[in-house]
Image (cartoon, rainbow, N blue to C red):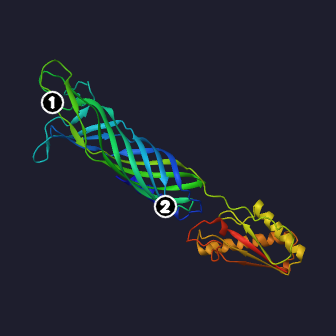
């Protein structure tokens, strides 16, 4: 059915959103390429000769190139070039349409050119040709979950379509008299205003890289295609002029595309430098973590080593390790993540010889940020565990 492909893409997008994982959303310019499948609707066209025909093309591959800019985590715009080829499947419909709207009289469409028909063999097959659409669109797109690895999106676009109707065939049931048959050709490109709707889901599988599953529905205003008819038999007989046909091009497509966004998120700050001299007084060490992780990195292990040596060197009486997160993610998830970060640092201290009886562990989730931010913000300075040492 019409729109069936877009509904399928929307279902995939909504189901995938429930399993989203945290992923950085990078702003800036991006480029993308898409390839997939498209299915044009039959172009229901009416001619200046008052004929009403349906130009039906086969489903075929489609390709798109995009260049855009992401203004905010949720909103981006892009310029899109698209190409949708397709072989002509049939040209059929009604004959001349009268005042009452009923097609009467031949021709009812086109069949294969150059095939003589008799009472014993009245048919001649389908005509040869193609229906190709080239588009240049400006799209506005909204990403629902830009901070997740899986992000559904919707969008709309306006622009221009150039549709090339190229078909050659024999008029059905024509002519009479001396001529054996008449062949009609279309080889015309017309330009029209176009608009489209988009729905899909992006998989942000690596920093700056996304895989886009996109459904598009395109519709144009009226296009005009002229025709030329010639006798193709013995001389004589009048020529049936079917005229110039007008109709709208409509198309549904589904593509898979690769998108690269230029630029990258800023790296986390380096760990603080070691103290100039071992002055054993109350001191706090800060251990930073990568986004959505609690395993100690090489830099984090170096800070834990400094804290352990400081605590052992001064004979610390109390050591409190407190875990924290940024505001990206739910409160419940962040509370658990901050607990894991605190325990990872505490385990590291004990493994480096710190007295476990002087050690206590606490966690705050996202409730005590080092840098105040709004909800859902990935701030590197808030992804930490603090080690407070007193003597």
Q: Mark 2 — residue? A: 74
Q: Indicate the secondary structure of the residue bearing disc 2.
A: loop
Q: Mark 1 — residue? A: 240
Q: In the rendering, at what x and y percent does residue 204 appear?
A: 56, 55
Residue 141 against residue 101 in the figure, above or below: below
Q: Residue at x 75, y 73 (%)?
A: 343
- Camera-nearest label, 1 or 2: 2
Residue 3 against residue 181 in the figure, above or below: below
Q: Toward which corner of the image does residue 7 lie, by quadrant?
A: bottom left
Q: In the rendering, at what x and y percent does residue 276 appear?
A: 84, 67
Residue 100 against residue 365 in the figure, above or below: above
Residue 304 against residue 388 in the figure, above or below: above
Q: In the rendering, at what x and y percent does residue 157 appear?
A: 38, 52
C-beta proximity under 8 Å, tags 1 and 2: no
In this rendering, would 241 be left or right of 300?
left
Judge whether residue 361 can be spotted in this image: yes
In this rendering, would 218 be left or right of 254?
left
Q: Residue at x 15, y 18 (%)?
A: 235
Classed neighbour count for the residue bearing mark 1: other residues with Cα under 10 Å, few (<14), some (14–19), many (≥20): some
- Label 1 to label 2: alpha-carbon separation: 57 Å
Judge whether residue 181 can be spotted in this image: no
Q: Residue at x 49, y 61 (%)?
A: 74
Outermost residue toward the left in this view: 99
């Amino acid at each position: 059915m019409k729109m069936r492909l877009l509904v399928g893409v929307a279902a995939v997008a909504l189901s995938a959103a429930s399993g989203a994982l945290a992923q950085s959303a990078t702003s800036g310019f991006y480029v993308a390429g898409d390839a997939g499948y498209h299915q044009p609707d039959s172009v229901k066209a009416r001619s200046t000769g008052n004929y009403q025909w349906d130009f039906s093309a086969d489903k075929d591959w489609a390709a798109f190139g995009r260049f855009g800019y992401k203004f905010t985590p949720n909103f981006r715009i892009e310029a899109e070039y698209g190409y949708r080829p397709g072989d002509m499947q049939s040209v059929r419909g009604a004959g001349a349409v009268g005042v009452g709207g009923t097609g009467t009289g031949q021709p009812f469409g086109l069949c294969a050119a150059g095939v003589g028909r008799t009472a014993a063999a009245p048919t001649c097959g389908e005509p040869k040709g193609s229906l190709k659409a080239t588009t240049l669109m400006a799209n506005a797109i909204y990403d629902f979950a830009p901070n997740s690895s899986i992000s559904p999106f919707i969008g709309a676009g306006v622009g221009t379509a150039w549709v090339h109707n190229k078909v050659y065939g024999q008029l059905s049931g024509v002519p009479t008299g001396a001529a054996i048959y008449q062949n009609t050709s279309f080889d015309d490109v017309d330009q029209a205003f176009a608009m489209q709707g988009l729905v899909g889901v992006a998989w942000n599988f690596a920093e700056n890289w996304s895989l886009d599953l996109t459904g598009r529905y395109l519709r144009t205003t009226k296009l005009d295609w002229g025709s030329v008819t010639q006798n193709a038999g013995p001389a004589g007989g009048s020529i049936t002029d079917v005229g110039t046909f007008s109709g709208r091009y409509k198309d549904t497509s589904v593509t898979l595309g690769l998108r690269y966004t230029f630029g990258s998120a800023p790296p986390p700050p380096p760990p603080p430098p070691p103290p100039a001299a071992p002055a054993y007084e109350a001191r706090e060490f800060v251990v930073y973590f990568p986004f959505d992780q609690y395993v100690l990195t090489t830099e984090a292990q170096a800070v834990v080593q400094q804290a352990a040596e400081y605590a052992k060197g001064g004979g610390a009486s109390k050591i409190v390790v407190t875990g924290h997160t940024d505001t990206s993610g739910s409160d419940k998830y962040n509370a658990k993540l901050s607990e894991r970060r605190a325990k990872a640092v505490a385990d590291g201290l004990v493994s480096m010889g710190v007295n476990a009886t002087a050690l206590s562990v606490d966690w705050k989730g996202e409730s005590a940020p080092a840098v105040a931010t709004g909800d859902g913000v990935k701030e590197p300075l808030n992804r930490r565990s603090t080690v407070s040492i007193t003597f």
